[in-house]
Amino acid sequence: MQFDHSTDVLVVGSGGGALTTALTASLLGADALVVEKTELYGGTSANSGGNVWIPNSHHTNASPYPDSREKALEYLRASIGNTVPLATLEAFVDAAPAMLKFLEERSHVRFEARGYCDYYPELPGGKPEGYRTHEPVPLHGRHLGGDLVTLRPPHHSLVLLGRYSWTNLEGTALLTQAPGWQWTVVRIMGRYWLDIPGRLRGRRNRYLTMGSALIARLRYSLNDRKIPVWLQSPLVELIVENGRVRGAVVERAGRRMLIEARKGVVMGAGGFEHNREMRERYLPQPTSGDWSASSTGNTGDAIRAGMAIGGAVSLMDHAWWIPVICAPGVDRPWALFAERSSPGQVIVDQRGLRFTNEALPYLECGEAMYRAPGGTAKTIPSFIVFDADFRRKYPLGCFGPGAMFPDSKMPPGWEGTVYFKANSIAELAAKAGIDPAGLAETVRLNNEYARTGKDLEFRRGDSAYDRYYGDARVKPNPCIAPIAKPPYYAVVIRPGDTGTNGGLVTDEYARVLRDSGEPIEGLYAIGNTASCVMGTKYPGAGGTIGPCMTFGFVAAHHALGQPAFGAR
Ligand SMILES: Cc1cc2nc3c(=O)[nH]c(=O)nc-3n(C[C@H](O)[C@H](O)[C@H](O)COP(=O)(O)OP(=O)(O)OC[C@H]3O[C@@H](n4cnc5c(N)ncnc54)[C@H](O)[C@@H]3O)c2cc1C
């Protein structure tokens, strides 16, 4: 076969896992080529909070709350159950800390562990004090030179006033209004305006944080090693010879190019959340790509390319669910990661009834809209209901705290579509189309729970995770406050996602498997292209990118015939 280009490892996609694969392969002495479909690199990983969940890391073990292999495995077993083979979980627990150390010692990648509690901290092996979630250390954009403009910008949920970048730690301080949060705002804004050369160049914030910092640090490292990243170069299909993947057809500048991958093809090209036909075929209904907060290039291409050569798939009916707020003219929805823990709001269905603990990890809260006992007809859409006090104090998706962002600043036409507002609960219910008796009773119960501190229906505020984003000044329960001060608000929410998480079935080396369980030689899948290595659970913040980078590291080692699991 006549190839147009040849490399050792061909990496499809440019999210956190894909770039980790390319960097690892290069650091192990091989050639790598990254091909990205869109005109921007970074995928949803660049849009994201950039947190990675890595148990038993050198950072965790230098913190006041060290971890161990056994404890991490115990927690994964307890939170995920038996749906994922033990070999995969062991591979993750062994390779994840090795990956972090390897990248930090040999590239510009840097993380710090955060005291962000696991999502199921009360389970065996869980860590309420956190330190398994790691946040990328910010990076100044000048290190990327001309590649700053093609770095996919952060999701608007994660940028203050559409302009100011913040770290996860700063975001938490603002959300929970921790002591001194006003100074945090000053620092965030000061950083932006004091970057005079940046301001002379344009509006883009060059202080890169969260997912931008993660992808920028990886790209900075790739550039040092002269690893090419081809933009606007989608994978079209895989090339197979004698049962082994030998490379791929990639479209570049309108031309089909045959790329040889001497050691393997690693596909980290995201899920299928922006493919309407696949959403309708696989996901629970109703569904819409407009409810997805992820990067729009993710249309399941790599999953279909793998299936076309015999790759098995599983978990195709799953996504990283999250309640979202959609607004006209805004390309992607606001994803409600943490605001649901703030006190003084309830999530209700069209009957005015709660159906979940609002403060649950986002995957569970979003999924509850599909799983509610009354069926989806009453839960899609649902509403977040709150009062004037909540509106004044806390942010919620597109609503900044009303003290700084009054209703008068909301875009015209949003009242009555994105949200409803009224002077009484009965009037609010009538405007939003919620059953008034149900809503009145729900508000009454909420106000009772605010007084006693006990949510007798859904135990909101019982878990350390619920309280992490609660308001510690609110007693006795930091996640529950009365809804009693007019005007009242109801914001329309839907079961959105941050990407799908079903895909190609892989083994503990990230090799794509056939239905028979045999690996397809030369083909690897990671991140949302693979059937999730965490099953249907999200063990802690960073539970998607952490495994994605880890199995990218594993795949590169395996393709190059090197062990990735340390002493194992
Ligand atoms: C606002 C937000 C915050 C989040 N915060 C976190 C967090 O803090 N921690 C965490 O773990 N998760 C977080 N997530 C989820 C996380 O970002 C994703 O699950 C993860 O980034 C997916 O990684 P991936 O590599 O599978 O896909 P992506 O990062 O989306 O990368 C896939 C890339 O492949 C490209 N591609 C698609 N098709 C092709 C093709 N045919 N050829 C070549 N390239 C192709 C896409 O254009 C894209 O660039 C967040 C998500 C959102 C939306």
Image: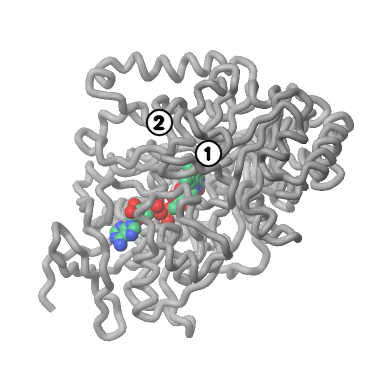
**Residue 462 in view of the camera:** no
On the rendered image, what quadrant is the N terminus found in? bottom left
395, above or below 79, in the image: above
The percent position of residue 549, horizontal first and vertical second, equals 43, 53
Q: Which residue is mark 1?
A: 59
Q: Secondary structure at mark 2?
A: loop
The percent position of residue 171, horizontal first and vertical second, equals 54, 29
Instruction: Name the amino acid type tagged 1.
Output: His
The percent position of residue 561, horizontal first and vertical second, equals 34, 68
Q: Which mark is residue 446?
A: none
What residue appears at the point 60 percent right and 61 percent down from the top-left corner?
Answer: 536
Q: Looking at the rendering, which quadrant does residue 418 occupy?
A: top right
Q: Secondary structure at mark 1?
A: helix
Would you say the beta carbon of the disc 2 residue lies within 8 angstroms of ligand 1?
A: no
In this view, the mark in front (1 or 2): 2
Q: Which residue is mark 2?
A: 138
Instruction: Name the amino acid type tagged 2.
Output: Pro
